[in-house]
Amino acid sequence: MAAVVEHPGPMSSAEIPIPEVARISDIEMKQARVAEFLDREGLDALLLETPANFAWFTSGGNCSREGGATPMAALFITPNARVVVCHNSETSQIFDHELPSLGFQLKERVWTEPLPDILSDLCRGRRVGSDRCFPNTQNFSDKIRQLRTPLTPFECSRIRTLGRNVVHAVEATARSLKSGRIEAEIAGEMAHRLIKHQITPRRLQVLADSRGRRYRHWRYDDTPVRRWVTLLAIGSRWGLCVGVSRTVAFTQLDTLTIASMQHATMLTATAARFSTCGWKFADTMDRVRRIYEKAEEAEEWRNAPLGGVIGYDPDEDLLLPKSDYLIQPQTALFYHPTVGPAVAGETILTMPDGFEILTPPENWPTIEVTVKDSTVTCPGILAAY
């Protein structure tokens, strides 16, 4: 006797994905940007395999498999079409969850067929640019990275939301701390709070006491926090990244440590104030170096980077002191200057007439820093004693 299978019936309205009009418009804008790029470079198509470029072009889609190094899908883009290339085991997740009703076509094969073979078939006989040196394509990874900036209005809206959520996670973790907690335990709590809001931790630093003086990019270990600690996190959602730091003291700090923290905060405020659209970063760095000199720390800037462009990668573009990088409107910059053991990290968004802090204090003590003709509200030190 044949088995009887019940028909599930019509889909309920809750099961039907609602098209994201703003996201569709953003993707169409990027399709046009890629079409111009293809025409300029004399290419027929663009092959994108890295998760950062996948997230950028799809305005927030994720092609990475948790815990794996190999993406679960790639994009093959022509002037008039955008195709997702993947195995049958990934199709449902990608089109139901990552790219619902967004105008993407599908090139699918069974999971037993290597994905590079499918991509080779697509590239054969075409002039194709790629972001991962795929065989028989031209590597345009650097130029593709440049397509990701400046941010679109849709991306600016999302990165503002992300900034507030990352701040909330870091500050909530910091406010709950007590002396004696282990660095790794604190990092785990930050990660928990980020993941709870669907934010992926991309970088976590827990600098106990004066750890940062010797290790400017320290992560965390089993060392207990005694006197004070700085938490720094870079979180990612929709492919976009935002970084921020906050400092907590469990006892009255010595004068030198307080001065170092004040100087680091002043440097962040100065970098933000002089991230002027149309300026070269070298001009911004000149203003920052003057602050180092006034604080009698003229060589301190050599110990660690001031910061750089952040977006679909935590390090979209590391800005060197003499860089000719031209600051554009709607560019996210993560500044994290160090002074001795202190670090002050904030993410800003450049605007045509100034800048916007994407990581303003939510429930945290603040200080007002005057830079030339502007007053910048910055986070202070939380006294937990």
Image: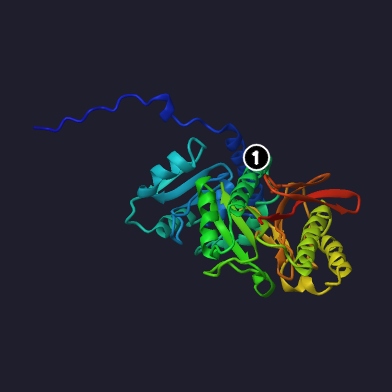
For the residue pair 212 and 110, the one nearer the viewer reads as: 212
Among the 4 quarters of the image, the one containing residue 306? bottom right
Residue at mark 1: 154
Residue at position x 46%, y 32% in the image: 17
Q: In which quadrant of the rendered image does the C terminus lie?
A: bottom right
Among the 4 quarters of the image, the one containing residue 301? bottom right
Viewed as shown, does residue 322 lie left or right of 189? right
For the residue pair 362 and 66, the one nearer the viewer reads as: 362
Q: Position of residue 308 (x, y in %)?
A: 71, 60
Q: Residues within 10 Å of mark 1 (few under 14, many from 20)?
A: some
In this figure, which colouring scheme has been used for the structure? Answer: rainbow
**Residue 332 visible somewhere in the drawing:** no
Tally the marks.
1
The residue sitting at the left extreme is 1
Q: In which quadrant of the rendered image does the N terminus lie?
A: top left
Name the secondary structure under disc 1.
Answer: helix
Rendered position, 348 above or below 134: above
Q: Position of residue 115 (x, y in %)?
A: 41, 57
The three-letter amino acid code for the residue at tag 1 is Phe
Viewed as shown, does residue 164 lie left or right of 196? right
Rendered position, 148 above or below 337: above
Q: Position of residue 249 (x, y in %)?
A: 67, 60
